[in-house]
């Protein structure tokens, strides 16, 4: 079975305006996560000899990553200018859809379509054979 879309178009739904503060916050969160990962990787050297250095490496990684992420987030936002000061979700939409099934399953597919939508009439309306 395949669902085939016709008349495809790219649609972008605007979610919110991105300010400098929002760009800094998102950058700080992403940087903090990355900093924690690097701190955890660096702390692997202290696995055999546990010490307070492991906690400090994680803390420093978190702090440094958050700071650098915030700075880079603001710089990236300012570099984009006002061309892209919104957050959006992109997707594809179609004008209409066709359901294509193998011939051996066409009767069952038409039956299922009739059960779900009483407007479907005829033996195979809405079902295309391959």
Image (spheres, helix red, strand yellow):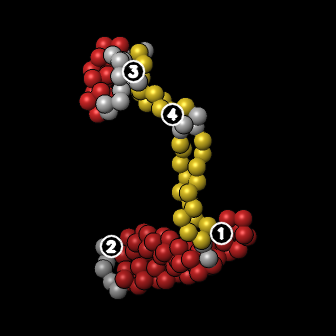
Say the numbered circle drawn on residue 129.
none
Q: Mark 3: give few (<14), some (14-19) or many (20+) Cα within 10 Å.
A: few
Q: Residue at x 46, y 27 (%)?
A: 98
Name which of mark 1 and mark 4 comes first in the sequence.
Answer: 1
In this figure, which residue is indicated by the disc labeled 2?
47
Q: What percent of the width, then of the height, locates residue 125? A: 39, 21
Q: What percent of the width, then of the height, locates residue 15? A: 54, 64
In this figure, which residue is indicated by the disc labeled 1?
85
In this figure, which residue is indicated by the disc labeled 3?
125
The alpha-carbon separation of the residues under discs 2 and 1 comes to: 44 Å
State if disc 4 and disc 2 touch (CB < 8 Å).
no
Name which of mark 1 and mark 3 comes first in the sequence.
Answer: 1
Name which of mark 4 and mark 3 comes first in the sequence.
Answer: 4
Q: Residue at x 60, y 72 (%)?
A: 18
In this figure, which residue is indicated by the disc labeled 4?
96
| Mark 4, secondary structure of its residue | strand
Name which of mark 2 and mark 4 comes first in the sequence.
Answer: 2
The alpha-carbon separation of the residues under discs 1 and 3 comes to: 46 Å
The alpha-carbon separation of the residues under discs 4 and 3 comes to: 14 Å
Q: What percent of the width, then of the height, locates residue 122? A: 35, 18
Q: Foreground mark, 1 or 3?
A: 3
The alpha-carbon separation of the residues under discs 2 and 4 comes to: 59 Å
Q: Mark 2: give few (<14), some (14-19) or many (20+) Cα within 10 Å.
A: few
């Amino acid at each position: 079975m395949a669902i085939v879309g016709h008349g495809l178009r790219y649609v972008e739904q605007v979610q919110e305006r991105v300010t400098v503060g929002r760009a800094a916050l998102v950058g700080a969160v992403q940087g903090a996560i990355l900093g924690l990962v690097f701190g955890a990787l660096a702390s692997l050297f202290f696995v055999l000899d546990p010490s307070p250095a492991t906690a400090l490496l994680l803390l420093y990684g978190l702090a440094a990553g958050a700071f650098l992420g915030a700075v880079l987030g603001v710089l990236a936002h300012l570099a984009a200018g006002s061309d892209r000061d919104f957050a959006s979700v992109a997707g594809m939409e179609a004008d209409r859809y066709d359901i294509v099934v193998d011939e051996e399953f066409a009767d069952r597919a038409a039956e299922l379509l009739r059960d779900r939508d009483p407007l479907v009439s005829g033996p195979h309306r809405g079902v295309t054979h391959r």
